[in-house]
Structure formats: C-alpha cells, structure tokens
Image (cartoon, grey):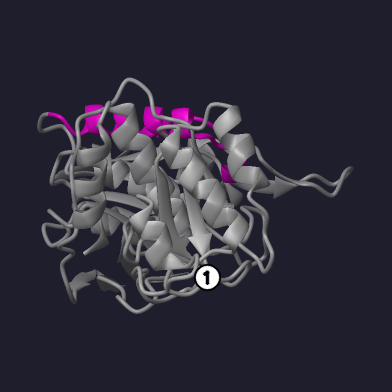
Amino acid sequence: MKRVLLITTGGTIASRRDAASGHVVSTVGAAGLRSTLHDPLDGIELEMEEFCNVSSFALDLPTVLGLAGRVAERLRGDDYAGVVVTHGTDTMEESAFMADLLVGSDKPVVFTGAQRPFDAPDPDGPRNIADAIRLAASDEARGLGALICFEQEFHAARDVIKSHTSRVDTFISAEHGKLGEIDGEHVVVHRRPTLRRSFAMPEAVAEVELLKLAMGTSGGFIAFAVANGARAIVIEGFGRGNAPPAVTAAAKEAIAQGVPVIMTSRCLRGRVKPVYGNGGGKTLAEAGVIFAGDLSGVKARILAAVLLGLGCDDGRLRAEFDYMAG
C-alpha cells in the first residue's frame, strides 16, 4: 500500500466564517480536513501533518523556505510515495515554485486548496484534496516536479497562475497549458515540463522586491528599495519589457550599485525581449538588466531570492535566468 503525507498550512480550504465578526478565518486543522475525505482512496494510506494554519496572504519567503525544507525532509527515504500540501490560493503558485526549485526528489509534490471555505454549502476542497492525494500516489506524476492540482487538472509550478479571484477553476497555465487531469481514478499526463532546475536548500532566501509598472511610473520605488537593502528588483514592465525613462534611469543606477534588476512583463502571455531603444527594453538590456523570458514577476522573484540566497554571483544569476526563461 502506498503512503502519502498531507501537510496542512491553512488557507480558504481550512477557513470558517466567524458568526460574530463575519470574517473568514483559517481555523480548521489537519484532523478537520481529514474528516471531509469520504473517498476511501483504495490502496493509499494517508498521514497528516500540520505545518501552520494561516491565510496564504500572510506567508513570507522564510516561512515558505521552511515549508520546502519540510517537504524535502519527508520525501527522503521510502516512507512516502508523495506529499500533498494544502495551501491558500493567493500565493500557492509562489510556494509551489519554491518547492519545485528546492525539493530534489522525483516523487510528486502536489499543492491544492479551495476557493470556497470549509463551511460553505458546496465546498470544493474535499474533491481537490482527494484528487491531489491520488496524483501524489501515482507513478505517472513522478519526475513532474511540484504541481498544483485544482478542479480535476494539474499544472507545472513554473507555469501556473491564479487567474480568477473567486471561481473554482482559477488555476491556468496560460499558453503552456495544463500538464494533465484527474479522470476519476485515472491520472492522465498530457505533457511533461522541461524547464526545471533543482538547487541545494539555502539557509535563507534574499530580499527581492517586485514593481509593476503603469504609465508614468517614477523611479522612486527602485531607489527606495535599493536604499533599504533589496538584494534584487524584479520589474513587471510593459509589453516586451519596456519601462518609462525614469524607471530606466533608476534601474541603471541600481545595477551600478550592484543590485540586479530583472525584467518580466505585466502581460499574461508572451516573452520579454530587448527590442525597443530610446529607454525601452534594448536600452535596459545594454545597461545590464536581466530578461526573464515568460516567467511571471512573482516566479522571477522566487528564483532570484533562491539564487541570491545560495550566494550566486551575477554570472550564475544570468545563466540560471537564461535557462529558466527558455
């Protein structure tokens, strides 16, 4: 019989509405989530472990680093076929990508959660957990890296994004598409990810800031971030990776002070590429800005935080971003 470990972290899937305040708060522990699983999942033995119990918007990078470390530790040896992590949806894609980078095992690591609270009349959590457990126990999922399993589909951690604030089919992989689906008792894999890296577990991750550009954005945030100790800055720029002149000037100054600047796009699909001059992407690239392909801003931030936490120099940072950018 295969054994799967389910690690709980809180989130909507573990939340109830407080009658007095009207607040939805994460209060349901591991035992409560286990009680919702009516499917016996024949051939799978489930064990539970509580890591924390918070909404995912309250998590930070050091905590998620600790979660990745816990998962990696539990997957050493032959005790478990895979791990499921229940997690809030707001930052699930970031935690999953952190695990993808740092859990070296080829055993499945499956993140799941819910868009509806534990005490909703029609919660989506129980089915998501059951599907995630089946996926984590499957031979088909080995070697796929960290995954998000939601609404009968599963996605690669590198590609997946939360696309809707409230609908249960929120997770998509934009133009890359899902990896596969859970069809009853069957795990169906449609494609396998190729742009993956596995790194040693750092003792800490670096502080990396993220800026989304809008028309006329100033360079003030970049200057402030540098002055306050940011180790790198990720920019979600316009289109192919362009920025207002003030931001371009601030990025040049940050790089001159030894702070890497990484360019992504605020667009949902497509890749950044240095094309435009007069302060645009070409000017930024000539100043030393790293272009992150089609990585989202939040994923580029996670990758930079891990690499800098490992002590990577500018050359290694660029090489790893070039690889992960595809």
Q: What is the quadrant of the N terminus in the image?
A: top left
The residue drawn where x is 58% and y is 43% is 222
In the image, is 142 to the left or to the right of 212?
Answer: left
Q: Quadrant of residue 292?
A: bottom left
Q: Residue at x 18, y 37 (%)?
A: 80
Name the spot of residue 118 as percent of width and height, x first. Answer: 61, 53
The residue carrying pointer 1 sits among few (fewer than 14), some (14 to 19) or many (20 or more) residues within 10 Å by Cα, namely many
Q: In this view, does 281 lie to the left or right of 247?
A: left
Q: Is residue 186 magenta?
A: no
Residue at horizontal 43 percent and vertical 71 percent from the top: 277
Q: Can you tell which quarter of the image residue 104 is in?
A: top left
The amino acid on which the numbered mark 1 sits, given as a three-letter code, is Phe
Residue extending farthest right:
20
| Number of numbered discs visible in the structure rendering | 1
When the figure is inspected, residue 322 is found, relative to residue 167, above or below; the finding is above
For the residue pair 315 and 103, the one nearer the viewer reads as 315
Residue that badge 1 annotates:
238
Q: Is residue 277 rendered to the left or right of residue 303?
A: right
Picture coordinates of residue 166, whole percent (x, y): 63, 68
Q: Which residue lies furthest to the top in this view?
A: 203
The residue stretch that appears in magenta: 48-76
Asked whether residue 134 appears in the rendered view, the answer is: yes
Percent across and percent down for residue 240 are: 42, 73
Query: Does 49 lie within the magenta span?
Result: yes
Residue 169 visible in rendering = no
Residue 306 locus on image (x, y percent): 33, 36
Residue at left offset 26%, top offset 51%:
321
